[in-house]
Image: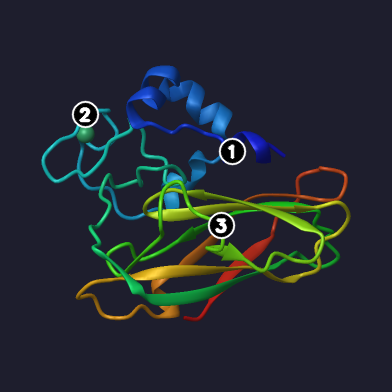
Amino acid sequence: MPAATMGMEPETPRRRAAQWPRGVAAVVCGLCLLSAVGPALADATCGDGRLDPGETCDDGNRTHADRCPANCVVEGCEADEKTAHAVDVHFAPPAGGRIGGLTVLVDFPEGRVTLPGPPMPDGVVTEAPEGALSIPVHLAHALRVTVARHGILAPGPLFRVRFWGCRGASPPSAADFACTVLEATDDFSNPVAGVTCAVAGP
Ligand SMILES: [Ca+2]
């Protein structure tokens, strides 16, 4: 599992665009299928690497699981640091599945809540399962977290995320969040399909 690498990604849009030709990135990242489940595409210019009218970012691809979402639009948020909205993320393996580690993408309503950072301080992603390591990556419009354990991760709670509210925005509901499993492996690092995750709260 590329946990350590993922936690250290520079992900500067221009640098990514320069270092990773689209075709290579599509093969290497292994996450690009997420572009198919991201928000509706903004227009034909999203993903061309140039900031066009209506776009807040363009990293040269339409991958959703990186710092610029599939539609090239990250909604603005003036963080209200006095409001906190905590959600709990759970996972479930397929019947009989043994999970040793997984990476999930938590898509949050960035016009309603936000995360401190990046870099994200300690104490935002908490309550990893006992004995497990969690590596969160702040993606501006989403949160990517790898959780791994030496042995088996018991199905159920994976971690808690404490978001800040956005000034003037209505409070979020659970339906505003979505969780997708990007990658899951068993205790021998073999890929496991059919793993799901979900967001409960706030
Ligand atoms: Ca563009």
Q: Position of residue 169 (x, y in %)?
A: 23, 75
Earlier-in-chain disc, 1 versus 2: 1
| Measured Cα–Cα span from mark 1 to mark 2 | 25 Å
Mark sitting on residue 122: 3
Tag 2 residue: 50
Tag 1 residue: 6
Q: Please state which amino acid type lies under the numbered disc 3.
A: Asp
Q: Is mark 3 within 8 Å of ligand 1?
A: no
Which color scheme did the rendering employ for the protein? rainbow
Look at 25% across and 62% down and name the residue there.
77
Q: Secondary structure at mark 1?
A: helix
Earlier-in-chain disc, 3 versus 2: 2
| Measured Cα–Cα span from mark 3 to mark 1 | 17 Å
The vertical placement of 134 against 67, above or below, is below
Look at 35% across and 47% down and name the residue there.
69
User: In the image, 74: left or right of 129?
Assistant: left
Q: Secondary structure at mark 2?
A: loop
Mark sitting on residue 154: none
Q: Is mark 2 within 8 Å of ligand 1?
A: yes
Q: Position of residue 108 (x, y in %)?
A: 41, 64
The vertical placement of 158 against 56, above or below, is below
**Count of marks placed on residues:** 3
